[in-house]
Image (cartoon, helix red, strand yellow):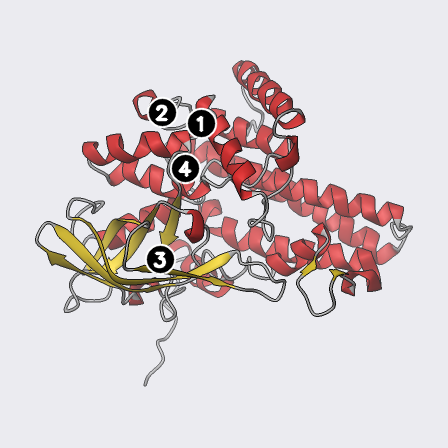
């Protein structure tokens, strides 16, 4: 299999690289490398300005058709851009939920009116989105959602609670998985609603972490309203749409993610050299193992993307989340191992709030990688049942 990119993509790569390099060395130098995992709270207004600059230059939502603000870019063009974005150390995107999740969902399952209403404002960075999936009793078991939506004339009235909602404080809209038929079986009776966030009946409470920052939020809906036609897909058919959204999460950005991990490994390796511990045989082996794991991740992603480009799926796609989450957690452990005892020291006032180094941020945040977006245990069940055809896990008897 040829895992190289076609030569005709080089002009596109050059265009993207030059634009990113110029912008991130100039007006937006302050946001370069900021806003990643564990740092999402930093420089929000500056990163919002960056998001809108990307949109004005049509470097967001590349796959969207031109009439909705995109470029109609091919899968490989998207991959090339995400690679160059990671190489340029572009900041964490405040519009990632709109571009990566709800935008493709509306393109695939939404009405023409929904496409024209929402997609251009996602592409321009004018409207930001958050995701209303998880609940206190419905995390990996998403079919257990209890947030309900009841019809009242030409509106839906939403009541319930969502948790671990990234970007909720800054978002204009939230796509919310709601139960619209409480008598239906678990995976039925669920609808996929688009709910405006700036209204009475919505209470956002940041979840303050031990670091003093708040990457996530609880969102309480108490009679919040949205228009009757703000349902994506069929009423009571939201489970299928929701699963489609999760599939988009495994798309063209995978190679960019791998390069972002590579940037982290380069920093860890440089730190090991500066601290004089790179000659330690155990650390050297761990650094080499991380480099090898990244090569495996890249080749697996390229094979998966090649299959996607041909309109087929491969079992490799099913293992991607399990692989990168486990790798990244181990990379965080390696980062603090290189620091040695200094990893336990922080700057700031005793008792907090305090500042973490990039290595400490990587370690602390990556502990959650194997939980969010589908816990490792759930991923293994999915692979066993849907890919390998094994019997389902026995259900507990109450």
Q: Secondary structure at mark 2?
A: loop
Q: Which residue is mark 1?
A: 55
Q: Looking at the image, do the residues carrying marks 2 and 4 touch, with CB atoms under 8 Å apart? A: no
Question: In the rendering, at what x and y percent does residue 174 appear?
Answer: 33, 49
Q: Which residue is mark 4?
A: 99
From the image, state whether disc 4 or disc 1 is nearer to you: 1
| Mark sitting earlier along the chain (2/1) | 1
**Residue at the image position 25 percent from the left and 59 percent from the top:** 178
From the image, state whether disc 3 or disc 1 is nearer to you: 1
| Mark sitting earlier along the chain (3/1) | 1
Local packing at callout 1 (Cα closer than 10 Å; few below 14, some 14-19, many 20+) is many
| Mark sitting earlier along the chain (4/1) | 1
Q: Which residue is mark 3?
A: 133
Q: Quadrant of the N terminus?
A: top right
Q: Looking at the image, do the residues carrying marks 2 and 3 touch, with CB atoms under 8 Å apart? A: no
Q: Which residue is mark 2?
A: 69
| Mark sitting earlier along the chain (2/4) | 2
Q: CA distance from mark 3 to mark 4?
A: 17 Å
């Amino acid at each position: 299999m040829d895992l190289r990119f076609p030569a005709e993509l080089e002009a596109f790569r050059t265009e993207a690289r030059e634009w990113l390099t110029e912008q991130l060395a100039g007006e937006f130098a302050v946001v370069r490398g900021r806003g990643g995992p564990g740092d999402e709270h930093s420089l929000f207004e500056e990163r919002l300005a960056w998001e809108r600059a990307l949109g004005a230059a049509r470097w967001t939502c590349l796959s969207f058709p031109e009439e909705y603000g995109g470029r109609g870019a091919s899968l490989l063009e998207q991959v090339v851009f995400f690679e160059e974005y990671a190489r340029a150390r572009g900041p964490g995107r405040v519009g990632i939920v709109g571009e990566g999740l709800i935008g493709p969902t509306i393109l695939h399952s939404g009405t023409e009116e929904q496409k024209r209403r929402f997609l251009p404002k996602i592409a321009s960075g004018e409207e930001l989105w958050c995701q209303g999936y998880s609940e206190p009793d419905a995390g990996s078991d998403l079919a257990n959602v209890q947030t309900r939506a009841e019809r009242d004339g030409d509106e839906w009235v939403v009541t319930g609670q969502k948790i671990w909602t990234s970007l909720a404080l800054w978002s204009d809209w939230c796509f919310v998985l709601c139960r619209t038929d409480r008598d239906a079986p678990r995976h039925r009776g669920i609808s996929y609603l688009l709910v405006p966030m700036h209204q009475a009946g919505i209470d956002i409470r940041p979840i303050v972490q031990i670091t003093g920052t708040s990457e996530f939020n609880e969102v309480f809906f108490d009679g919040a309203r949205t228009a009757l036609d703000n349902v994506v897909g069929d009423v009571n058919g939201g489970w299928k749409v929701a699963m489609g959204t999760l599939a988009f999460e495994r798309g063209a950005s995978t190679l960019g993610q791998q390069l972002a991990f590579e940037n982290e490994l380069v920093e860890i390796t440089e730190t090991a050299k500066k601290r004089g511990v790179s000659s330690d045989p155990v650390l050297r082996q761990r650094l080499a193992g991380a480099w090898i794991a990244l090569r495996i991740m890249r080749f697996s992603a390229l094979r998966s993307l090649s299959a996607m480009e041909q309109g087929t799926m491969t079992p490799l796609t099913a293992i991607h989340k399990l692989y990168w989450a486990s790798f990244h957690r181990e990379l965080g452990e390696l980062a603090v191992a290189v620091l040695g005892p200094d990893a336990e020291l922080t700057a700031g006032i005793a008792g907090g709030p305090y500042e973490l180094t990039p290595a400490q941020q990587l370690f602390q945040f990556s502990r959650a990688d194997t939980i969010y977006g589908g816990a490792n245990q759930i991923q293994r069940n999915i692979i066993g049942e849907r890919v390998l055809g094994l019997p389902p896990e026995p259900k507990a008897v109450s």
